[in-house]
Structure formats: structure tokens, C-alpha cells
Image: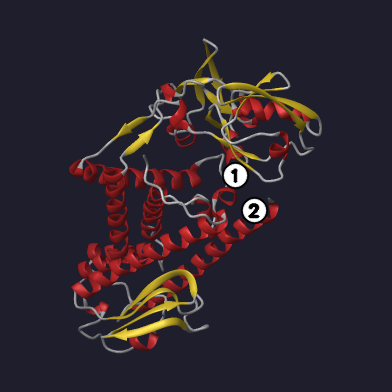
């Protein structure tokens, strides 16, 4: 029995609330990482904000907070611009661009008065915290739920191929044996191996015959362009009728939750892909459904709407039809698994990032996304296990992105500090100011571009 908490709300609101909760928590913890090391080295922190109290990246525009309270030397607050957060550390060139402070002689409590290795840890604090958060979340996930997956060899009904997969040579029911000449243990790893390792050759068992499917160049790009219009290949699964919409054609014809549709106008429909294919020929016509209800055969007759939509959700439950592998982890094993999963996921994300710039089949405009793309990662129905998995993944993304050597990001400061540690020469504040300004402008441009792509896709779809 899996532990799930379900919120009965519309899918879009559930996705938005999950995104807001995950990002708010991770931003707070990221900034706390900087705050912790700054305080550890007796550096004054003037502000600690969730979200920006100005129009990022312009510190002089629209300065106001939704909430703020000063405690000691630090002002804690909630900004109005919800695309990040920050800590303002005394004596540091940052997004606040406080030049008046930088024109004064360095004070003992300021960032610029600290040793280079201390400043490096202060700047790495947010990244370290994001990695630690991911590790702790994964430890909790594996300790509570363990791990469950479908071995490729246990996908006994083969694959369900969408129109693009059929076009390149796959067929419904194909059983995948190897990908790029390599055996893959988990079904979910098939697409990863194909896309990121560019393993274009598949061996499949097709009705007892071994067939080689060579996927042509350009297919990966078409998959990315499709974006949610199909899964390329998925698990072929028998199905039952799930929830039936009120007033729908399914309700009018007499379908009930739990029915098994075995034929449509005498065409076998044991699998959902067969049902979807069969109904395309009968749009707007009267049809006969052969079903099994409570182990008894029943025939239902009615009209299939012109748009081909019956109006019910298929109940496709892998647990019911397949032998899944379940791994339970004890206390120490879950700790080890938490560490390995975090660093494997970090490495996998690096592969995806590198793939974006090195693959001939991928364009940034087709792969980049902003806040909408982030929100669409979360499912429309809330589950603690899924939410925690995605929160850990987003924490790794934040750590990775902040590590990029771009001025204005943590990685930009780290780059200059490593130069100082190696060469013994400190980069001047003037150079830092100019580099940070350029970096912030680049970040703003990238942010507008990525979110603009999301908006364009929404209108296009």
C-alpha cells in the first residue's frame, strides 16, 4: 500500500501550488546556505529575502516588500517579484549594486575583508545546501517507499508505439531486447539510452522473430518538437474503464467504471492502443462495444461522437498487469542510496545540458523552458512521493545552474575566487561590478527568452 495524499483540486492549480511550494522551500534553503557560511565567518548579512523586493535585475526599481522584519543586523523579508531570492552580504558586489558601501574602506565584518577560501565557501554555500537537501530528500524517499520499477524483460505485452515510432519502424507489441547493442535493465531507461547515448539501433522481438529497427537521424528532434503529443514508445498495457464523465458518450452508451472493453464492432481492443486505433474508423457512427463486467460478457450500443471522444479515463495500472521489482532499503542502505542517486542525477542532468549544445538534432528554442515548463513537471494530482522526487530533482537543477561560471550567479563569483586562489591576485571591485552587470543582463535576457518560449507554446497549442 503506497502512502499518497490526494488533493481534490483542478490539475493546473495543484501543479502551480506544488511548483510554488518546492521553489520557495529550495530558494530559502539555498540562501540559508550563503547565510550560514557568512555568519560562520562573522560576516554581516544585511538582508535575507525570499523573492526580490525590486524588479530583478534592477535594484533601484519598484523597491518594496510584502513583509519585512529586522532582527539584529539582518532584515528578513518577503519580496513581491517571485523569481528567486537573495541575501545581501556586507561588502560584496552583488545584484543590489550598493556602490556607496563599496567606496568605503573595508570593515572587519565585511565579505571583502575575509580570506579567499572563506569567501569561496560563502559563495558555494547555496550550492552545497541544494545538494545536501537533495541527498536528504532521496534518503527519506528510499527509506519510506523504497524503489519500484518495471524490468524491461517483464514488459510482457511489448511496447505501445505512437505514430512517429511506427513511422521509423516500430510496431505495437514489439518487445525490446537491446538498445544500441546493449541490454537495458529498466523500461524507463530505454528512452534515456536512445536519446542521450544516441543509441539508434534497437533489436526487438516481433511475434517471435528478431527484428532490427534503425532509427533515422532527426527522430530525436521530432520527439522533442512533439512535446507531450506522444510518448514515442510506452508500455503496452491492458486497460479498464476508469472515471466516466457525466453526460459523456461513455455514460450514454452505458459504460461503467471497471468495465473491460474487449472489442469495438468486433475488432479486438484488449489494449488501449488497439481501442484508440479501432475507434478512428467509426467517428460519428453507431458502434457496438463488447465488454466484460463482473466476469460476465455484455454488449453495449450507442453513438461515438464525431470527435472520437467517449469521455472516460482509462485505468492503466501497471501493478495489476506486470511483475514489478521492488527494493526496500534499511536505514544505512537508504543513506547510501540517497548519496548515489543525488550524484547520478547531477551527472545525468549534466549529460542533458551538454546534449543541448552538442547534439545536431536539438535546438535550444525547442528544448528550453521557463516557469511554465517547470510547473508542467509536477503531476495534476498530489502525491508526497512524486512531490519529493521532483523537489529533489529541482534542487539538483538549482545547484547545477548556480554552478555555471556566469557573473551574477554563484558560479561566476566562484570562478573569480578560484582565479584569486591560484594566482594570488584579487580581481578588482570595478571589474566585478562590470562583470556582474553584464551577467545580470544576460540572465534577464535568458529568463525572458525561456519564459517567452513557454508563452509561445501555450498559444501555439
| Residue 190 visible, this orientation | no
Position of 164 with respect to 98 (left or right) is right
401 sits left or right of 90 in the view: right
Q: Which residue is mark 1?
A: 227
| Mark sitting earlier along the chain (2/1) | 1
Residue at position x 58%, y 36% in the image: 257
Kindly check if marks 2 and 1 are in contact, taking CB atoms under 8 A apart as contact.
yes
Q: Secondary structure under badge 1?
A: loop
User: Does residue 345 show up?
Assistant: yes
Quadrant where the N terminus is found in the figure: top left
For label 2, the residue is 457
- Location of residue 103 in the rendering, given as x and y in whole percent from the top left corner: 34, 88
Local SS, label 2: helix
Query: Rounded to the nearest whole Å, what is the CA distance between mark 2 and mark 1?
Result: 10 Å
Q: In which quarter of the view is residue 129 placed?
A: bottom left
Vertical relation: 173 (above or below) 458: above
Q: In the image as oriented, which residue stretches furthest toward the top?
A: 208
Q: Position of residue 317 (x, y in %)?
A: 49, 33
Quarter residue 47 falls in = bottom left
Nearer to us in this view, 401 or 278: 278
Amino acid at each position: 500500500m503506497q502512502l499518497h495524499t490526494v488533493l481534490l483540486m483542478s490539475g493546473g492549480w495543484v501543479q502551480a501550488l506544488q511548483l510554488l511550494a518546492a521553489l520557495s522551500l529550495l530558494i530559502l534553503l539555498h540562501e540559508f546556505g550563503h547565510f550560514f557560511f557568512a555568519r560562520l565567518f562573522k560576516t554581516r548579512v544585511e538582508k535575507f529575502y525570499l523573492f526580490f523586493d525590486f524588479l530583478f535585475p534592477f535594484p533601484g526599481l519598484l523597491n518594496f516588500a510584502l513583509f519585512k522584519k529586522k532582527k539584529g543586523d539582518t532584515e528578513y523579508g518577503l519580496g513581491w517579484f517571485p523569481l528567486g531570492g537573495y541575501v545581501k552580504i556586507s561588502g560584496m558586489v552583488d545584484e543590489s549594486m550598493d556602490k556607496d558601501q563599496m567606496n568605503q574602506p573595508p570593515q572587519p565584518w565585511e565579505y571583502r575583508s575575509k580570506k579567499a577560501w572563506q569567501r569561496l565557501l560563502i559563495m558555494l554555500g547555496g550550492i552545497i545546501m541544494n545538494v545536501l537537501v537533495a541527498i536528504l530528500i532521496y534518503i527519506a524517499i528510499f527509506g519510506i517507499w523504497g524503489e519500484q520499477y518495471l524490468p524491461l524483460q517483464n514488459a510482457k505485452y511489448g511496447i505501445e508505439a505512437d505514430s512517429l515510432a511506427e513511422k521509423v519502424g516500430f510496431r505495437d507489441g514489439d518487445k525490446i531486447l537491446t538498445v544500441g547493442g546493449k541490454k537495458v535493465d529498466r523500461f524507463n531507461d530505454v528512452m534515456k539510452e536512445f536519446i542521450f547515448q544516441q543509441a539508434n539501433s534497437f533489436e526487438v522481438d516481433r511475434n517471435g522473430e528478431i527484428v532490427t529497427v534503425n532509427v533515422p537521424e532527426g527522430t530525436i528532434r521530432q520527439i522533442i518538437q512533439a512535446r507531450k503529443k506522444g510518448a514515442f514508445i510506452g508500455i503496452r498495457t491492458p486497460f479498464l474503464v476508469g472515471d466516466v464523465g457525466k453526460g459523456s458518450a461513455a455514460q450514454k452508451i452505458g459504460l461503467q467504471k471497471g468495465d473491460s472493453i474487449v472489442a469495438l464492432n468486433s475488432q479486438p481492443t484488449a489494449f488501449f492502443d488497439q481501442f484508440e486505433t479501432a475507434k478512428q474508423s467509426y467517428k460519428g457512427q453507431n458502434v457496438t462495444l463488447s465488454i466484460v463486467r463482473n466476469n460476465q460478457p455484455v454488449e453495449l450500443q450507442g453513438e461515438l461522437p464525431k470527435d472520437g471522444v467517449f469521455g472516460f479515463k482509462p485505468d492503466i495500472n501497471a501493478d495489476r498487469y506486470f511483475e514489478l521489482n521492488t527494493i526496500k532499503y534499511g536505514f544505512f542502505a537508504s543513506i547510501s542510496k540517497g548519496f548515489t542517486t543525488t550524484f547520478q542525477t547531477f551527472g545525468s542532468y549534466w549529460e542533458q545540458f551538454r546534449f543541448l549544445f552538442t547534439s545536431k538534432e536539438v535546438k535550444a528554442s525547442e528544448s528550453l523552458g521557463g516557469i511554465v515548463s517547470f510547473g508542467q513537471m509536477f503531476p495534476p494530482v498530489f502525491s508526497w512521493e512524486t512531490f519529493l522526487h521532483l523537489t529533489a530533482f529541482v534542487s539538483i537543477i538549482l545547484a547545477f545552474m548556480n554552478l555555471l561560471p556566469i557573473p551574477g550567479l554563484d558560479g561566476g563569483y566562484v570562478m573569480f575566487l578560484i582565479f584569486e586562489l591560484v594566482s594570488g591576485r584579487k580581481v578588482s571591485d570595478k571589474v566585478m561590478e562590470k562583470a556582474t552587470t553584464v551577467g545580470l543582463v544576460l540572465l534577464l535576457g535568458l529568463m525572458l527568452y525561456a519564459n517567452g518560449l513557454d508563452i509561445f507554446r501555450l498559444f501555439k497549442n
